[in-house]
Image: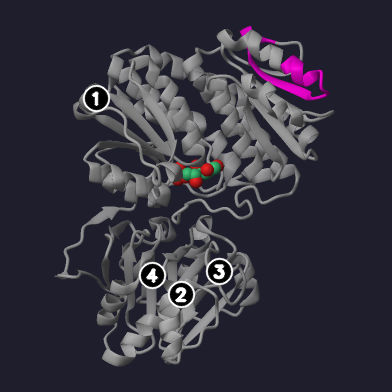
Amino acid sequence: MCGIVGVISKQLDCNQKIRYGLKKLEYRGYDSVGYAYILDNKIIINKCKGTVENLYEKYPNLKEFNIGIGHTRWATTGKADNKNAHPHLSFHKKIALVHNGIIDNYNKIKSFLTKNGYKFKSDTDSEVVANLIEYYYLKNNNIMESLKLSSQILIGNYAVAILNIDEPDRIYFYKRKSPLVIGVSNDGLFLASDSLAFDKYCSDFIDIHDDRFGYITKDNAYVFSNKGIVDVKSYKNENKSEDNELGHYPFHMIKEIEEIPSKIEKLLDVYYKDNNYNFTNNLLECIKNSDYIIFVGCGTSYNAERILSRLTDQINKPTLTFIASEWSYYPVYFGKNPLFVFLSQSGETMDVIKCIDIVKEKGFKSLLITNSEASTLAKKADFVLPLYSGREIAVASTKAYVTMITVYLLLIGAYQNDASIIDEIKEAITAIKDIIARKDEIYQIALKIKKKKNVFFLGRGYDYDMALEASLKLKEITYIHSEAIAGGELKHGPIALIEKGVPVFCFFSDKKTYHALLNNVNEVKSRGAKVFNIVNESLKTNDEQFIIKDLPLRVSMLSKIVFAFYLAYFVSYQKGLNVDKPRNLAKSVTVE
Ligand code: F6R
């Protein structure tokens, strides 16, 4: 949440570079935006409520400069408005600062600074940080020392980039728990929350570890720990070669849905090379030696972990699933030697980071399934299975959900030394391609529900897990209230919500629950619900239905969920909403 970018260049071209970075970081927050630069011994700040487009409409006359910092915001402390937008200028106008994170003790520091004559223009914790650094700087005339001193006081998490009016040849930074990387190019250096912000300019990046601080100049990066300067390692910026452009698609979400078949194929290439599974023996041994498999994640990743947990039954290991934000406050352990499996598309979700820290402290092993190999979580996990899905730009996760399930299916195949899953996954790819080819049918169904206030999804077993994901997707991008109900639970309360005309989508994948689920369908129909079933060929019903090629149960979710992704997408699109940037959300949830 919130994206920060800083650029120092050999040319007077920072304006376009910052604009590029801000646009790329908008997925991290898009309720306000701004940038600051130094020109003619002055710090100039342009910022406003709204999107990057709004900012450049407001400030169309672009000045050229060679040092600047920028920020896209997802409001935490202080509402989304002009005054709370970043960058923040310190009281004595020495320092401009952009911040990603949350400072827990900012009120206390604010009182201290107020007593020392400081006045504040915004409600943010970030402005407090700018003033705290300035407070020390005015005493010691040394920003590095001021960063050190202030970091000893700040409680919380932060990645911060700072301009100092007295040193227009460098951008300072410090970081604790929020992501921050340095981009290196022949023309200058960058700082950003994500290497995506400078993918066009830098082929390498340097990762900054927690509790490091320092500065970049147009030629070099200087990174320090409390003990002194540290050696840094640079990595290839994989984003550089990625296709993150929309092409002919109106939104990233539909592009990402339609990438699903190729992303599954990629996983087959990577994890089943030359007819052999490609997982390390260490990981397979670790699974073998574990007596419990405990899954932890949030949102869509949590919904995926429920499926993974069911798949784990096949290897006769007891499993449990947890929501990360719950487990971190109420950690429970099962077995003597549990393996914790964390799922996180971004690898930066703070609630999950808190959990992995607890698990590490306890000395238990962890496996991370992620789309970001360079993420904070990836650095902490004992084993990492990358999804190789390419960047998800749309806030609503789609291809990551499907690839999380696929990679785990492959892992189970490797563990059981059973290649039959490969053909099943290939069948699922064919089924997905068929759904993509029939998306117009889903468009028509979406037309029928776009004006509805409530929508329900029903299922049992795997189908219930999928219903949870279908429901989350619909509500988050269409703002229609929706709920997923386990078929058998209907009569225990939720059926009270069923009234004439309410749409109920029901997933049928499992022969075992076919009749029980059909009874549930009849129950809601007889109370006036408008039922749409998503069924396998061999599990047809007499209702309006979308028929999908028969697939073995364990891979059936890979295809059926694509129906639900399209449904949510088309409803959002027909309502004229910003599909990729739903209100109040951000792609990477880096605060608790
Ligand atoms: C919903 C969605 C979110 C994320 C959740 C966890 O479409 O994308 O629910 O799944 O915020 O994010 P990651 O997987 O990055 O930990």
Q: Secondary structure at mark 4?
A: strand
Magenta span contains residue 180: no
Looking at the image, tell me whether mark 3 or mark 2 is earlier in sequence order: 3
Q: Which residue is mark 2?
A: 107
Q: Which residue is mark 3?
A: 33
Q: What amino acid is labelled 3 in the image?
A: Val
Per the model, the C-alpha gap separating discs 3 and 2 is: 24 Å
Magenta stretch bounds: 521-540
Q: Which residue is mark 1?
A: 284
Q: Nearer the viewer, residue 258 or 132?
A: 132
Q: Are marks 3 and 1 in contact (CB under 8 Å)?
A: no
Q: Which label sits in the foreground, 4 or 3?
A: 4
Q: Vertical placement of 339 versus 153: above or below?
A: above
Q: Is residue 138 visible?
A: yes
The residue drawn where x is 61% and y is 75% is 82
Looking at the image, tell me whether mark 3 or mark 1 is earlier in sequence order: 3
**Relative image position of residue 402 (x, y in whole percent):** 48, 31
